[in-house]
């Protein structure tokens, strides 16, 4: 005997697509005149056409039925469009906030530069700028040009010669290789 929990007969337990792109998704609609396949907009157009045809032939019940099917897909489409608009507005709000933060940082940087660097740094820049300032101080000590000496440009320092190993030392170590 099967457990009642493993298989529910309620409609809410059906596998339905969660979110996704409903606007461009292809649906199979089982209407009174057979299957109608297409995007929600195509299905709405088809059911509206079927409703007009039924109305012209004098079948009010069929016309109302087709209109209800069209309305269902119209609601699906409008809900999906609302979700898309909400996501777009949220993304635009986040972009505006990021841009405002960048503008604020740029204005602070320009203010510091115009004040000669005396303005306090924002917390994020304090961590990294300490190293940059130390490098700038070191380069200022090296010369007025602000250029850093490279190893090629620096005069070579002579090393002190190594002490020669005794002649009776037979280890064959680095002292003999240096001679």
Image: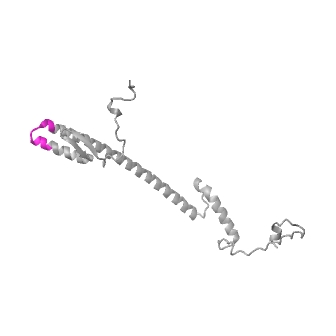
Q: Is residue 4 above or below residue 155?
A: above
The answer to if 54 sits in the magenta stretch is yes
Residue at 13% x, 43% y: name it: 53
Tell me which segment is drawn in magenta: 52-62
What is the tally of numbered marks visible in this picture? 0
The image position of residue 175, as x and y in percent, is: 83, 68
Q: Is residue 48 left or right of residue 156?
A: left
Asked whether 160 or 129 is in front, the reply is 160
Asked whether 3 or 142 is in front, the reply is 3
The answer to if 39 sits in the magenta stretch is no
Q: Is residue 91 left or right of residue 176?
A: left
The image position of residue 35, as x and y in percent, is: 22, 42
* Quarter of the figure that contains the C terminus: bottom right
Q: Is residue 88 above or below residue 60?
A: below
Asked whether 17 or 84 is in front, the reply is 17
Instruction: Give the quarter of the image for residue 127.
Output: bottom right
The image position of residue 65, as x and y in percent, is: 18, 37
Q: Residue furthest top?
A: 1
Residue at 52% x, 57% y: name it: 105
Q: How is the image coloured?
A: one colour
Q: Is residue 108 above or below residue 51?
A: below
Residue at 64% x, 62% y: name it: 133
Instruction: Give the quarter of the image for residue 143.
Output: bottom right
Chief secondary structure of the magenta span? helix
The image position of residue 40, as x and y in percent, is: 26, 46
Instruction: Give the quarter of the image for residue 160.
Output: bottom right
* Quarter of the figure that contains the N terminus: top left
Residue at 44% x, 51% y: name it: 94
């Amino acid at each position: 005997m099967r457990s009642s929990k493993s298989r529910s007969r309620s409609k809410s337990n059906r596998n339905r697509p969660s979110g996704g792109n409903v606007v461009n998704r292809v649906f199979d609609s089982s209407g009174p005149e057979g299957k109608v396949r297409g995007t929600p907009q195509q299905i709405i157009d088809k059911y509206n056409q079927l409703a007009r045809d039924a109305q012209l032939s004098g079948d009010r019940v069929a016309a109302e039925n087709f209109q209800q099917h069209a309305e269902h897909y119209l609601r699906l489409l409008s809900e999906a469009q609302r979700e898309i608009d909400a996501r777009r507005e949220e993304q635009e709000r986040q972009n505006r906030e990021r841009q405002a933060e960048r503008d604020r940082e740029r204005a602070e940087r320009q203010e510091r530069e115009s004040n000669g660097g005396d303005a306090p740094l924002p917390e994020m820049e304090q961590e990294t700028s300490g190293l940059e300032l130390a490098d700038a101080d070191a380069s200022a000590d090296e010369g007025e040009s602000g250029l850093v000496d490279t190893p090629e440009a620096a005069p070579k320092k002579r090393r002190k010669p190594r002490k020669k190993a005794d002649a009776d030392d037979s280890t064959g170590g680095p002292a003999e290789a240096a001679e």
